[in-house]
Image (cartoon, rainbow, N blue to C red):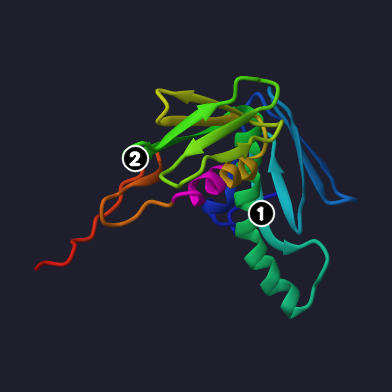
């Protein structure tokens, strides 16, 4: 089969240490890597090139053939591409996110009992904020101002937990204090001039 009619941006190079299974009847693709297995239900048809080790996401719908179904398949083509890329990252690497606490007295502390997997945060409020880390993820605190969230869970679980911690004290635009991602830069606003 020739793949010249498909765009290059919808092709994914599959790593050599990943095995791929596709069930055409159930429309499920399964990736098996060094860390775990991951399955996805696809709404568009994939094509495989075993010689080049490529997976090509087409804009042909698995179910509908109407005009609305064709439009939905074009939309789902990009979504499916992103889901497959995230799945390949999840099965090959341990995912982590790094947060830093910027501000006077902003700290993170680990609980004494490691079985509880809890942290508490001191973020300028009158009280401490207790935060339960899910069992699929782990946390590690360096110098009380840097927090690592890591695990071989899904990408969305790690980013969801990071966003929940960040919502406890979002960075403010005048002094830049708050909970920031490690490489994040904030454009500071100028205050009122008197």
- Quadrant housing the C terminus: bottom left
Examine the rendering and report whether any part of residue 53 can be seen.
Answer: no
Residue beneath label 1, please? 80
Q: What is the secondary structure assignment of the residue under circle 1? A: helix
Q: Is residue 49 magenta?
A: no
Residue closest to the eye, 76 or 24 = 76
Residue 135: % across, % down: 71, 31
Q: How far separated are the C-alphas under marks 1 and 2?
A: 37 Å
In the image: residue 21, left or right of residue 149: right
Nearest-to-viewer mark from 1 and 2 = 2
Q: Where on the picture, by quarter, is residue 30? A: top right
Q: Is the residue 81 above or below the residue 72 in the image?
A: above
Q: What is the secondary structure assignment of the residue under circle 2? A: strand
Label 1, residues with CA under 10 Å away: few <14, some 14-19, many ≥20: many
Q: Which residues are magenta?
A: 162-169
Residue beneath label 2, please? 102
């Amino acid at each position: 089969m020739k793949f010249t009619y498909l765009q290059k941006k919808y092709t994914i190079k599959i790593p050599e240490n990943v095995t791929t299974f596709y069930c055409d009847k159930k429309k499920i693709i399964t990736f098996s890597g060094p860390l775990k297995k991951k399955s996805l239900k696809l709404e568009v048809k994939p094509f495989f090139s075993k010689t080049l080790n490529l997976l090509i996401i087409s804009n042909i719908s698995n179910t509908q053939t109407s005009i609305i179904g064709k439009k939905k398949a074009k939309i789902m083509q990009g979504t499916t591409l992103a889901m497959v890329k995230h799945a390949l990252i999840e099965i090959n690497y341990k995912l982590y996110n790094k947060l830093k606490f910027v501000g006077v007295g902003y700290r993170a502390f680990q609980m004494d009992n490691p079985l509880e997997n809890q942290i508490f945060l001191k973020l300028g409020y009158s009280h401490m904020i207790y935060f339960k880390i899910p069992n699929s993820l782990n946390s590690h605190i360096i110098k009380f101002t840097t927090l690592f969230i890591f695990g071989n869970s899904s990408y969305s679980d790690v980013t969801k937990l990071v966003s929940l911690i960040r919502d406890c004290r979002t960075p403010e635009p005048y002094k830049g204090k708050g909970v920031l991602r490690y490489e994040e830069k904030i454009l500071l606003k100028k205050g009122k001039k008197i």
